Image (cartoon, rainbow, N blue to C red):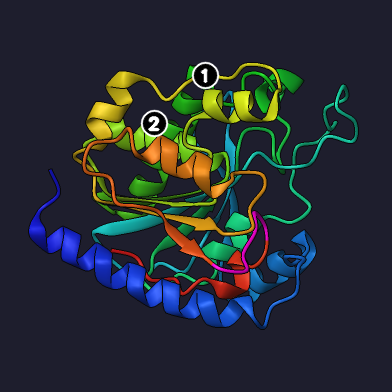
Amino acid sequence: MPSSTSCRSLRRAAACLLAVGLLAACAVGASPPERATLEDRARAAGFTRLSIGDPELPLATWLGPEPGRTTVLTVVLEGDGAAWPRPDRPPADPTPRHPVALGLALTVADPPVAYLARPCQYDHPPACRPALWTRDRFSDAVIRATGAALDALKDRTVATRLRLVGYSGGAYIAARLAAVRDDVAALVTVAGVLDPAAWARHHGVSPLPPLDAATVARLATVPQVHWIGARDTVVPPALARAVLARIPGAPAPREVPGFDHACCWVDGWSGSFP
């Protein structure tokens, strides 16, 4: 189980973020920044664009300035990406128009930090196929590719520990990896789809993989914080609470008034992590 020190740190970070979020909810518009805007911000902040990990299925990343030798790397995982133009037609390119996770990464005050895209977002290696951003987006192959990218980022930054931050569907990827790796210091989710099967049943769409019992049991040992928007209809608060109730010892989600699935995480995020 998490140590008492870890739990206190998590609570302090949670309280700080909640205070910032409440203020931002009254001040920020409904639309998150566009991709071009966030990429301009990333370049101005000294982030470097890379492709990293499995040579067959490398993932796009923006890596922030490296402050020399460090121990903990924060990695923010993107959501599922571009919206479907029609219920029966997936996007030809899954790159998000509004990469919320990139915006979150740019606010992290404790370097080093990296933004990690999902397969076939930004880059389109030969291994890319539509299944990787549709029915197989939570598959074991995607988990392995993401794990390989995390290993490569650790090697590059000489970090020994990871803070994994998952936005939307990226939360499930982060949780799966937090459950099987021994180098994860904390798991943070933002508007997270933690159980794709439960999410799919709620929305009446094609079945997706569940948050299995083995992952649930292992997550009980990982320090974690979960953020949800009170107005989120993509991941409704009741759905998020029901999933978290299955994880022994998991904290209740931190619900932010005025926030939905996209608004207003980028400009309302404090960048504070345990």
> Dot 2: few (<14), some (14–19), or many (≥20) neighbours within 10 Å?
many
In this rendering, position of residue 84 left or right of residue 153: right
Return the residue nearer the eye: 61 or 234. Answer: 234
- Residue at which label 2 appears: 176
Is residue 263 positioned above or below 91 on the image?
below
Residue 197 visible somewhere in the drawing: yes
Among the two numbered marks 2 and 1 on one chain, the one whose residue lies closer to the N terminus: 2
Residue 109 visible somewhere in the drawing: no
| Residue 47 x/y as whole percent | 56, 66
Q: Is residue 211 magenta?
A: no
The mark lying in front, picked from 2 and 1, is: 1
Q: At label 2, which amino acid type do we have? A: Arg
- Residue at which label 1 appears: 209
| Residue 215 x/y as whole percent | 32, 26
| Residue 163 x/y as whole percent | 34, 53
Q: At label 1, which amino acid type do we have? A: Pro
> Dot 1: few (<14), some (14–19), or many (≥20) neighbours within 10 Å?
some
Task: Please report the bounds of the magenta region as a residue range.
Answer: 257-262
Q: Residue at x 10, y 53 (%)?
A: 3
Q: Residue furthest front?
A: 238
Report helix, strand or loop for mark 1: loop
Q: Residue at x 66, y 44 (%)?
A: 234
Report helix, strand or loop for mark 2: helix
Q: Residue at x 55, y 63 (%)?
A: 104
Return the residue nearer the eye: 18 or 89. Answer: 18
Is residue 150 positioned above or below 133 on the image?
below
Return the residue nearer the eye: 121 or 29. Answer: 29
Q: Are marks 2 and 1 in contact (CB under 8 Å)?
A: no
| Residue 22 x/y as whole percent | 52, 77
Q: In the rendered image, which quarter contains the C terminus?
A: bottom left
